Amino acid sequence: MKKRIWYIWVLLVFGLWGGLASATVITLDFEDLTLGQSYSVGDSFTTSGVVITVEQFQIPEGNWDTYGDVTVDTDTGLGFNTAGGSGNELGVSGVNLYFDFDTTLIGLELLYGDFGGNLNIELNGDFVNFGNFIDIDNTTIGGTSISTLDNGTPGQSTGTLSVVGTIQSFRIGGGELWIDDVVAIPEPATLLLLGLGSLALLRRPRGSNR
């Protein structure tokens, strides 16, 4: 009997782990936002449960611009979705976006379209002002490994940004930048704690108030 109970708990642990791992991957496709809505520096908005704050942008000379905005976009007249996704995307014009995932991540990926030639990125407090996404390919920022799958056309490139490593904070912005399909992966420890908490509730004896 004890062996059977142990076996059941093992199945529950692995079942919860697998379910939580798949359920808690965070995906932002911006389809829940209102098309055409704009947000300025100091504004915050929520998409798929993640709060995004619009912040000032650093131009190449090192000065900070506070007059840009971000707009929920879908097509810029170029005949395609500028970030390479589908449906809504974010059109970033002279601002940075701070993504508050409210958890530690171990990886992040997004689609981008860069048509401005000046970009900002911040990871774990390490801020970088750079020209094109290809410039940060195979680099380390904030202790994370960065890679870009870029079409290699400076000033009008599209591609995928991938970040691997522990991510405590993430910001990104550009002069003329579009982003879509942000996928964030919480660290396994977070998922495990959630799973163990669920198991503890299941194991509490009936009628117990403790």
Image: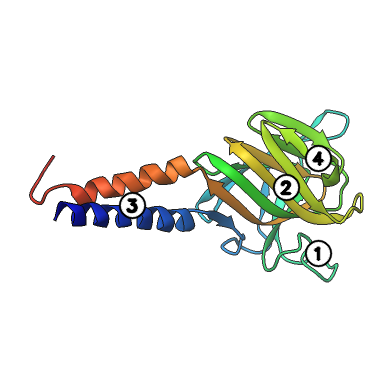
Q: What residue type is labelled 1?
A: Thr
Most extreme residue toward the left is 207
* x, y percent for residue 152: 89, 53
Tag 3 secondary structure: helix
- Residue with the mark numbered 3: 13
- Alpha-carbon distance for marks 2 and 1? 16 Å
1 or 4: tag closer to the N-terminus: 1
- Residue with the mark numbered 4: 136
Left or right of 183? Residue 68 is right
Q: Which residue is drawn at 76% across and 63% down?
A: 84
- Alpha-carbon distance for marks 1 and 4? 26 Å
Most extreme residue toward the bottom is 79
Q: Which mark is residue 69?
A: 2
* x, y percent for residue 146: 73, 41
Contact between marks 2 and 1 (CB within 8 A): the answer is no
Q: Which of 99 and 75 is in front in this view?
A: 99
Compared to 75, does 40 lie above or below?
above
